[in-house]
Amino acid sequence: MFCSCPTPSFTQAPVPRSFVPRSLQGDASRHGPGSGAIAKRSLPKLAFPKRPLPKLRETLLSCGLGLAAILGAVPALGAEVMNIAYGPFEVSVPIEELEHYARTGQLSGELSRYGGLFSPEQQADLRQALNQRVEMNPTLVSQIAYSKTGDIVLKRLGSFINSNDSDNGVVALRATVVQAAASPEGLTLLNLIRKFPTREVDVDMQSGMQIATEVTALLAQGDRMVATIEAQAQQEASQSSVQTPYDLRRPGVFRWEKTSLALRDEGRVGNFVRDRAVPLDIYMPQGLQGDPAPVALISHGIGSNRKTMAYVAEHLASHGIAVVVPEHVGSNSDKFRKFLDGVDGPPEPQEAIDRPLDATFVLDHLEQLEQTDSRFRGQIDLTRVTAIGQSFGGYTALALGGAELNFPSLARACVNGEPKSFLNFSLLLQCRVAELGSAPKLADPRVKAVLAINPLTSKLFDRSGLGKVAVPTMVVSASSDFIVPPSEEQLQPFTWLKMRDRYLVVMRNATHFSTLEPPAPEDEGLPLPAGLEGPDLALTKSYTAALSLAFVKRHGAGDVAFDPYLSASYAQQLSGPAVPLSLVRTISSEELNQAARSVPKQQL
């Protein structure tokens, strides 16, 4: 369903402004020749900051177009002139000259006068950025553009991209992004400019560069932290030689059967009333002898479902582990399909409470099955549960393991439900949780270990809340995750953990989606641009399967024979060139802070 906006009426297009200080521009700069006209002045040598454009390109494509890819556009007259301001100076460029440059790589007209400000390499990067297309469902774009989250994002973008009759371009941007997504040309930076619903679009370069610089600094700091962790992993690997005779990536010897149940929880936890469906898949290994199987519980992320990490469930079950995978109906793919169809809203803040309670309800039900159902009687050990989760599922796993929501931390980071910082996309979700104000205890004593993949933690838990986790914990981070930035959400938070058995795994070049099974078309709740899963999905899935198995066997089943597989040395053995893998047992906050401070100034 598309939302429409009224299209404003416009008079004759203004004459492009010459490149002069704003203070010297008379009325003619806006209304053409006539009273108050000024003489054209020679072009001053404007010193635009010489940022390393390849890094800015990555930033703008992932956080600008990637951001636009989460938003959407509407019919409009279309921009004819782009006015780019930097401090007191302003330059007007006809959009047709940008289009000509994007199409041919040749600077013409007004645009040719400013080509000397950028190197050939920077010009090529700019052309690529203008033409880079992001494939997004126009309905998704429209729905999110008109959501609260979309409004927050557009408001920040509108502070430096707007029309000359508006202080903030949020309304025009909303129309622009929806129209661009729905047009045959698709969602590109050039098309966003072309579809802007006024004849002029004003770009405040200084404000935009400040945001781009902040994002680039965050990415550079994360990269330096990852490099420090990789060096630590090399050192740990060199100090110990471990024997790892088995390839944990291979399937195990057990056959398994999947049982699907449709449960409903109608209980109450404190002030929270539960009336919620809890679909559930159980992967049960067959032919077990001796001790009952340890249990792994897998929590999916937002916009996913219980099929997303089915490959991990099947792998663990083939090695004699019982796996339970609940579906969180308040934030699953079906919820997002209804949201996109306009018949439901986005996930509610209470999802942060309901998800851990889903898991506890499932474990309670399994205790009943273990007593009453011959398929499970004496076959599962619910005193040895490992919670595994990805993204918001990673949050869920940590909460089950003892991490406590920290509402004072959220209050400091958010104002009226909006994050003070725009750089960390995950804060858009974290600040929604702040609306709850309080929460019951979410830890489950049956959970004896936690494996959190790309979790969001920084403000939800902060240092004090995450420090409450007392069970063995593995945190998995992807260096190219621009949705849940690793430096703020996994790397530094890992140093807040206090238990003896803790592991930090880093997949360089991996993204937020590199450990997920691509959804079937009928299951797709949040369509993503092609390639966003990272350079080698088969490789990253093999890492996830092997390390999950080692972690559950060691800390869920208590088998010390798997200690060597939870080492920097074994991670080196698994590692492939497309996505280098590192594992460390220890890294200090001081080491990471020093790495962040060591980012060269040219990267900022």
Image (tube, helix red, strand yellow):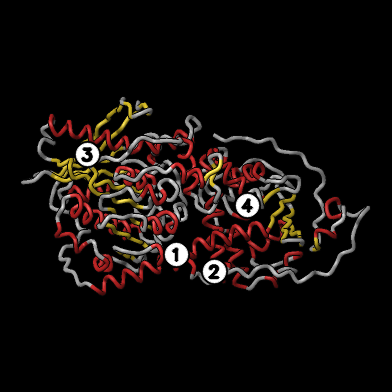
Give the vertical position of 385 relative to 160 (above or below). above
| Camera sees residue 308 | no
At mark 4, the secondary structure is helix
At 38% from the left and 39% from the top, the residue drawn is: 522
345 vs 534, left or right, is: right
Q: Counting other residues with Cα less than 10 Å from the Cα at mark 2, is it few (<14), some (14-19), or many (20 or more)?
A: some
Q: Are marks 3 and 1 in contact (CB under 8 Å)?
A: no
Q: Quadrant of residue 81?
A: bottom right
What is the x, y in percent for residue 213?
Answer: 58, 62
Give the residue at mark 4: 191
**Residue labelled with disc 1:** 593
Asked if residue 359 lies left or right of residue 521, the reply is left
Which image quarter is the C terminus in?
bottom right
Q: In front of the other: label 3 or label 4?
A: 3
Query: Identity of the amino acid at label 2?
Result: Gln
> Which amino acid lies under the numbered mark 1 shown in the image of this protein?
Asn
Whether residue 140 appears in this view of the structure is yes
Residue 106, compared with residue 295, is above or below; it is below
| Residue 172, above or below 480 | above
Query: Of callouts 4 and 1, which one flags the residue occurring earlier in the amino acid sequence?
Result: 4
- The residue most toward the right is 35
Identify which residue is drawn at 64% across, 44% down.
170
Task: Please tell me the numbered disc located at residue 603.
Answer: 2
State the image coordinates of residue 198 (x, y, percent, origin top left).
Answer: 72, 46
Q: Return the x and y of residue 80 as percentages of the image width and height.
A: 74, 52
According to the picture, the residue beneath numbered tag 3 turns out to be 282
* Comparing labels 3 and 1, the label whose residue is closer to the camera: 1
Q: Left or right: 599 with respect to 310? A: right
| In contact (CB < 8 Å): disc 2 and disc 3 | no
Instruction: Name the kind of residue labelled 3 in the image.
Output: Ile
